Every structure is written in C-alpha cells, then in structure tokens.
C-alpha cells in the first residue's frame, strides 16, 4: 500500500527480465522513457509510456523488465 510517510532508504534499480525488484513505496525516474513492468500482486506486465524526467511513480513494482524499458536512472524508495 502506498504510504505518505517520507522514505528513509533507497536503492538504484537495474531493470532485469527475470529478477524481482525489492518491494518499495515509490519509483523515481531520473531519465524519462517507457517502463515495462509488473506491479506487486498483478498477473501481467504493463507498459507505462513516456514517463517524464524526474517523475516519482507511487506504484509497488514486482518486476521492472529490461526488455521494453527505455527509462533510466531509476531509484526505488523504501
């Protein structure tokens, strides 16, 4: 569940087609583009298109796929 509490930890995100991401609260996108991923509890991948630079996404991603992801410099906040 999304929390309005400030994050106190973060980690760089490396998109990977098979490795799960650590469960966080927000994904920060430094360099915009497309993100192909799967939210925690979902059963299918989705594509978030044209995410702008500097955008925080209040979603809990289980996977952020390398294939189809063009956004970069992403940080997950815990």
Image (tube, rainbow, N blue to C red):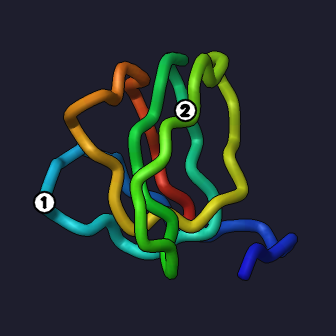
- Image position, residue 3 (x, y; %): 79, 76
- Image position, residue 14 (x, y; %): 24, 44
Q: Residue at x 68, y 46 (%)?
A: 57
**Around disc 1, counting alpha carbons within 10 Å, would you say few (fewer than 14), some (14 to 19), or many (20 or more)?**
few
Q: Is residue 33 left or right of residue 1?
A: left
Local SS, label 1: loop
Q: Residue at x 63, y 58 (%)?
A: 26
- Image position, residue 24 (x, y; %): 52, 70
Query: Which one is nearer the viewer's eye here, 35 or 22?
Result: 35
Give the residue pinned by disc 2: 29
Q: Is residue 57 left or right of residue 44?
A: right
| Image quadrant occupied by the N terminus | bottom right
Q: Residue at x 55, y 60 (%)?
A: 77
Local SS, label 2: strand
Residue 76's label in the rendered image is none
Give the residue pinned by disc 1: 18
Marks 1 and 2, how far apart in space? 20 Å
The answer, for residue 78, to whether it is visible in the render is no
- Image position, residue 56 (x, y; %): 69, 41
Instruction: First in sequence, mark 1 or 2: give its number.
Output: 1
Which of discs 1 and 2 lies nearer the camera? The answer is: 1
Q: Please give the count of numbered marks on the rendered protein.
A: 2
The answer, for residue 7, to whether it is visible in the render is yes
Position of residue 35 relative to residue 4, above or below, is above
Which of the 4 quarters of the picture holds residue 78? bottom right
């Amino acid at each position: 569940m999304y929390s309005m509490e400030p994050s106190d930890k973060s980690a760089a995100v490396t998109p990977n087609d098979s490795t799960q991401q650590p469960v966080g609260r927000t994904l920060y996108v430094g360099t915009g583009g497309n993100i192909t991923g799967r939210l925690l509890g979902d059963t299918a991948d989705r594509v978030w298109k044209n995410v702008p630079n500097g955008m925080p996404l209040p979603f809990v991603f289980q996977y952020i796929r390398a294939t189809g992801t063009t956004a970069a410099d992403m940080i997950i906040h815990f």
